[in-house]
């Protein structure tokens, strides 16, 4: 299914603008249709849950009810990991019992049946038909680019709500990155929390959470970190400079690990320029790495071409040697056959003389 009722979320045209730009670019290329839910409202994210349990499920339920009425038959898709979890949590709550569903109807003062499913953009892109469409549109594989796929804590947990991927070692984004030619690294922090809004509330305690993510990505050979959550992206991309300043002051090497949305890299593999998919809006410079890896890929391709030519030359040389040996054997066999034929011809004259003599003797006796 490549058509969804789209829940943009509050970050779509603010802190997550580059995600929106890249997603729109890719969606148009592959025929992935996103119909925006009319009059949607903020999902509440973690702030609503801290304020009121009822508010936390009612806010997403209102948008789900509108989608159910205005866009019947379409599942709801959210690109933001936080929005996805909020919507899924509300949907799960509604489906747990008729009492819960009736409570939500009362809270939002709307009819609601909880029929439409909720998926994340990542889950939607992991579907076989979408993967095929992505693969068909790749014109420039991102070879030599080593990526640490960062799912964060909201995309795959809690497992009872999110369901679509492994909560400890998810693979959907890794598989998409491999599909476009990048090399996903195996690392330990792909589902660790980045601190979320705690980066603003208690930055001294929260910043080490980001630093450890960068440390583990770097230790496992990643060139960059790839994510699907606007808040994770904001925390990592925007705060890398601040973390680097503290590291330099402490006598440590600064990080140089750009961060990307997964749709940005897919767009680049489709042939888009970096700024066409929002990369120019990043805080930490990212285009230099992309250019360097593009050059590395060209050098690798040249080396592979040279290697193939050398293999073809060796095969041709071996084939020529085999052909020469076969020809020599054939010539030797022909020479032997000729020699044997010549010996038979020479030996046939005495035999004829004996036969003639025998015939003459027989005539005398007669």
Image (tube, rainbow, N blue to C red):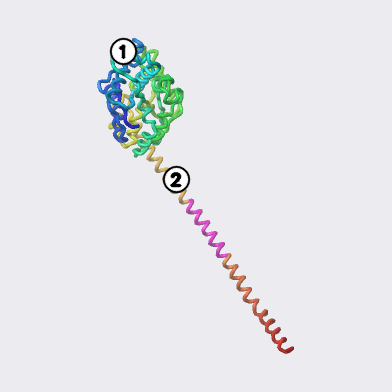
Magenta residues span: 314-332
Can residue 4 be seen? yes
Q: Residues within 10 Å of mark 2 (few under 14, many from 20)?
A: few
Determine the image quadrant of residue 213: top left
Closer-to-camera residue (116/203): 116
Q: Position of 338 compared to 257: left or right?
A: right
Q: Which residue is mark 1?
A: 107
What residue do we see at 69% from left, 85% from top? 359
For residue 30, above or below residue 340: above
In the figure, is residue 286 to the left or right of 320?
left
Mark 1 / mark 2, whichever is N-terminal: 1
- 1 and 2 marks in contact (CB < 8 Å): no
Residue at image point 25% right, 23% down: 38
Q: Position of residue 201 (x, y in %)?
A: 35, 12
Numbered disc 2: secondary structure: helix
178 and 74: which is toward the camera: 74
Q: Is residue 147 above or below residue 106?
A: below
């Amino acid at each position: 299914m490549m058509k969804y009722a789209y829940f943009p979320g509050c970050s779509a045209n603010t802190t997550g603008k580059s995600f929106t730009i890249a997603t729109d670019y890719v969606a148009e290329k592959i025929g992935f249709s996103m119909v925006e839910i009319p009059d949607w409202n903020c999902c509440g994210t973690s702030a609503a849950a801290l304020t009121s349990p009822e508010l936390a499920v009612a806010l997403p339920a209102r948008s789900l009810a509108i989608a159910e009425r205005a866009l019947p038959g379409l599942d709801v898709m959210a690109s933001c990991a936080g929005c996805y979890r909020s919507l899924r949590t509300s949907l799960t709550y509604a489906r747990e019992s008729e009492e819960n569903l009736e409570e939500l109807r009362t809270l939002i003062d709307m009819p609601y049946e909880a029929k439409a499913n909720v998926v994340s953009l990542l889950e939607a892109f992991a579907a076989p038909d979408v993967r095929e469409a992505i693969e068909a549109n790749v014109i420039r594989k991102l070879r030599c680019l080593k990526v640490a796929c960062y799912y964060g804590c909201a995309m795959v947990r809690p497992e009872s709500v999110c369901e679509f991927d492994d909560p400890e070692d998810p693979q959907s984004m890794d598989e998409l990155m491999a599909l476009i030619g990048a090399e996903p690294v195996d690392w330990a922090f792909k589902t660790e929390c980045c601190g979320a809004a705690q980066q603003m509330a208690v930055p001294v305690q929260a910043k080490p959470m980001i630093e450890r993510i960068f440390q583990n990505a770097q230790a496992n050979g990643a060139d960059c970190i790839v994510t699907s959550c606007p808040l994770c992206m904001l925390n990592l991309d925007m705060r890398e400079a601040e973390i680097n300043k503290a590291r330099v002051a402490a006598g440590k090497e600064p990080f140089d690990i750009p961060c990307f949305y997964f749709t940005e890299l897919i767009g680049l593999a489709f042939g888009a320029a970096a700024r066409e998919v929002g990369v120019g809006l990043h805080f930490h410079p990212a285009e230099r790495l992309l250019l360097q890896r593009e050059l590395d890929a060209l050098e690798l391709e040249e080396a592979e071409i040279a290697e193939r030519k050398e293999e073809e030359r060796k095969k041709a040389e071996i084939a020529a040697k085999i052909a020469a040996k076969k020809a020599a054997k054939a010539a030797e066999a022909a020479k032997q056959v000729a020699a044997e034929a010549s010996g038979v011809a020479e030996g046939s004259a005495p035999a004829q003389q004996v036969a003639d003599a025998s015939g003459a003797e027989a005539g005398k006796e007669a």
